[in-house]
Image: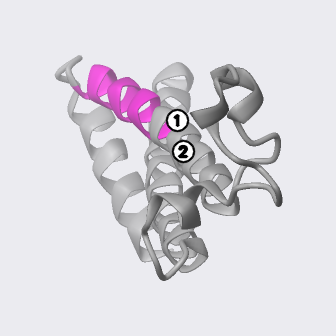
Amino acid sequence: PAGMALSVLVILLLSVLYEAVKMGKAMLLRRALLALPRSLSQEALAEPQEGDSGPAQGSSSLTAFPISFPRWFWFHVGQTLFHVVQVVLGYMVMLAVMSYNAWIFLGAVVGSTLGYFV
């Protein structure tokens, strides 16, 4: 009985965490869209360094690559990490629900509901 209650509680918390990660990913997307330059030209996205003439002089692609990444790139990296965590949590909850245990299923539903509500 105690092991089952603990299992339901863990699934409930995993479901809440899944919803929290989903909301965090949405907030990060909003911040990433605000960080994008208004002009989506290649020059605005790459933010070239002053005096950089580009690969036309025969320089290698490694030296033409900017050292510092633009701000939107780091938001994209953060979104990617959030996505990986969200997928892993989703599969874990799905695997628990596939045990066909009614209490585990209810724990996942209640956790998802609480996570969305909060």
Q: Is residue 95 left or right of residue 73?
A: left
Residue 63 in sight here? yes
Q: Is residue 60 above or below residue 90?
A: above
Relative image position of residue 97 (x, y in whole percent): 25, 28
Relative image position of residue 20 (x, y in whole percent): 52, 59
**Nearer to me, 42 or 37:** 42
Badge count: 2
Task: Please tell me whether residue 7 belongs to the stretch shown in magenta.
Answer: no
Q: Residue at x 36, y 35 (%)?
A: 90
Task: Measure the alpha-carbon separation of dots 1 and 2.
Answer: 5 Å
Task: Please tell me whether residue 93 belongs to the stretch shown in magenta.
Answer: yes
Q: Is residue 77 above or below residue 111?
A: above
Magenta span covers which residues? 85-97
Relative image position of residue 77 (x, y in whole percent): 60, 43
Q: Which residue corresponds to mark 2?
A: 82
Circle 1: element type: helix
Circle 2: element type: helix
Main SS category, magenta section: helix
Relative image position of residue 33 (x, y in whole percent): 49, 73
Q: Residue at x 51, y 40 (%)?
A: 80
Q: Which residue corresponds to mark 1?
A: 85
**Nearer to me, 66 or 89:** 66
Residue kind at label 1, given as amino acid type: Val
Residue kind at label 2, given as amino acid type: Phe
Q: Residue at x 70, y 24 (%)?
A: 59
Q: Is residue 14 left or right of residue 70?
A: left
